[in-house]
Amino acid sequence: MRVILCVCKGGRMEKIRSGVIVAELFQDEKKIYKLWSADLFECRQCRVKVISDFADRPMAQWPQTEEMAQILNIIAEAKRMGKYYEWPEHPSRR
């Protein structure tokens, strides 16, 4: 079993929500690059939250996804359920 520790005082991070949707964005354009499924964790001591346990592959990826409407529907549903987060920088630009 994998354990995620917080740097605050070594507090153990607990999974508080499974299957959140993370939109990876192009930094300069604020356009969606990929949609990922991941899990949301929180430290019991300091309440900091982190997203981890990303799926092996994205749910959708631009420009391979032909149905942008499908991506927008996934995002709308995730926002409605409080399960939507943005990752504001494409990894190749770090």
Image (cartoon, rainbow, N blue to C red):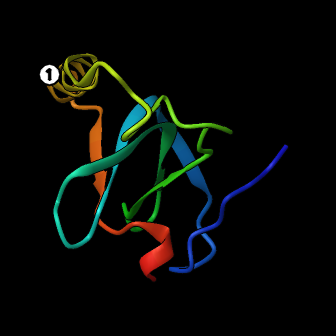
Query: Percent x, y for residue 54?
Result: 59, 44
Give the total of numbered labels: 1
Residue at left 42%, top 79%?
Answer: 93
Q: Secondary structure at mark 1?
A: helix
Query: Percent x, y for residue 65?
Result: 39, 27
Position of 68 with respect to 7 (left or right) is: left
Residue at left 49%, top 29%?
Answer: 59
- Quickly name the residue at label 1: 80
- The image quarter containing residue 4 is bottom right
Give the vertical position of 80 relative to 62 (above or below): above
Position of 83 with respect to 73 (left or right) is: right
Q: Quadrant of the C terminus?
A: bottom left
Residue at left 37%, top 41%?
Answer: 62
Position of 37 with respect to 22 (left or right) is: right
Query: Percent x, y for residue 51?
Result: 47, 52
Residue type at numbered disc 1: Arg
Comparing 29 with 41, the one in front is 29
Comparing 19 with 4, the one in front is 19
- The image quarter containing residue 20 is top left
Q: Quadrant of the N terminus?
A: top right
Comparing 17 with 8, the one in front is 17
Residue at left 28%, top 25%?
Answer: 71
Position of 43 with respect to 63 (left or right) is: right
Q: Residues within 10 Å of mark 1 (few under 14, many from 20)?
A: few
